[in-house]
Image: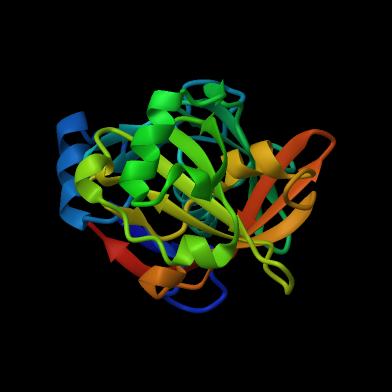
Amino acid sequence: MRFSQVDVFSAQPMLGNPVAVVHDADDVTDEEMAAFARWTNLSETTFLLRPSTPEADYRLRIWTPGGELPFAGHPTLGSAHAWLEAGGAPAGEDLVQECGAGLVRIRRGATLSFAAPPLTRSGPVSDEDVDVIATALAITRDQIVETAWIDNGPGWVGVLLRDAETVLGLEPDWASFGDLKIGVVGPYADGPLAAELRAFCPGYGMPEDPVTGSLNAGVGQWLAGRTLPTSYVASQGTVLQRAGRVHVELVDGQIWVGGETRTTVAGSVDI
C-alpha cells in the first residue's frame, strides 16, 4: 500500500506536526490499524478509504497510539494533501472528507483549510473540573482567566491564561490529568502571532501534541472575534522545538483552520 508522511502547520521542513497516511486502506482491519498507529508512534495515523456516501470524496479513519478518534485537525489537512498528491480529484471545488464526526469540508487555496465541525460538547466547566485542571497544569485557580468545553471529538476543554508567556512556562503534573484533554491558550500583546497554544493529552499516549488542528478549531469557535481577532495566526509547539503556525479565520459564522502541508516521507507499507 502507498504510504505518505506529511508535515502539517509549518512552512519550515520538519517543524510542524507529522501525520502518517496509509492509502487505499479498505482491506485493513481495525486491529491492524491500531497496531500500525502504535508502531508509528505519531500523534495520529490515518487510513484513506472509499467513501460510504456520494457526498464525500473519501473516507478517513484517524488513530492515535491509544485508539481511534472521530475527528482531528492536522490529520485532516495532511490526509487531504496526501489524497490530492496521489491523484485524487474532488467532485466539487472543495474536498469533502467523511470521518467519524461526519462530513468535513476542506478548502483549497494557497494552503488547505478545513471548516471546523460543530462542537459535540460546549459550555461552562464545573468548579470541580476547574480545580482538577489547575492541579494538572500546576497553577493556581486565579491564574485561569476563563474555561470552556470546546470538544469537537478529541475531548478538549479550553483554558485561557493571562498571556502567551504563562502558557510557555507551564510544567504540568501529568499524574493529575486523569482522562482530561486540556488545551491552553494565551494571547500575545503584539506582533504577528495572536496567541500561543499547548495541547496536553496524556490519555492518548502522547503527553503533549505538537500542533493541533482540532484544538485550534475549538479555540477559534470559543474566542475568535472576542478575546482573539476574527482572523489570526496562532503559534503552537514552541516548547517542543516546533514552529507550528495555524491560520484561523471566522467567515459568516464559520471557523476555518488552515496551514502549510508538505510530504516528508513517501513510499509503501506492508501491514
Q: Who is closer to the viewer here, 42 or 208? A: 208
For the point 19% across and 39% down, which residue is it? 34
> Which of 148 and 248 lies nearest the eye of the viewer?
148
Q: Is 70 left, or right, of 217 in this rendering?
A: left
The image position of residue 215, as x and y in percent, is: 51, 44
| Residue at the (59%, 33%) spot, across then down | 104
Q: Residue at x 27, y 40 (%)?
A: 177
Q: Is residue 123 above or below residue 43?
A: above
Measured as percent of width and height from the top left, residue 73 is found at: 50, 45
On screen, residue 230 above or below 105: below
| Total numbered circles | 0
* Residue 110 visible somewhere in the drawing: yes
The answer to which image quadrant residue 41 occupies is bottom left
- The x, y position of residue 185, in whole percent, is 55, 52
Q: Is residue 175 left or right of residue 68?
A: left
Q: Is residue 8 visible?
A: no
> Relative to 51, is 67 on the left or the right?
left
Give the colour scheme of this rendering. Answer: rainbow
Q: Is residue 37 or residue 245 the one in the foreground?
A: 245
Nearer to me, 41 or 167:
167
Residue sticking out furthest to the bottom:
12
Q: Residue at x 51, y 45 (%)?
A: 142
235 relative to 146, above or below: below
- Locate residue 163: give its quadrant: bottom right
Q: Provide residue 266's location: percent of width, then percent of height.
A: 35, 67
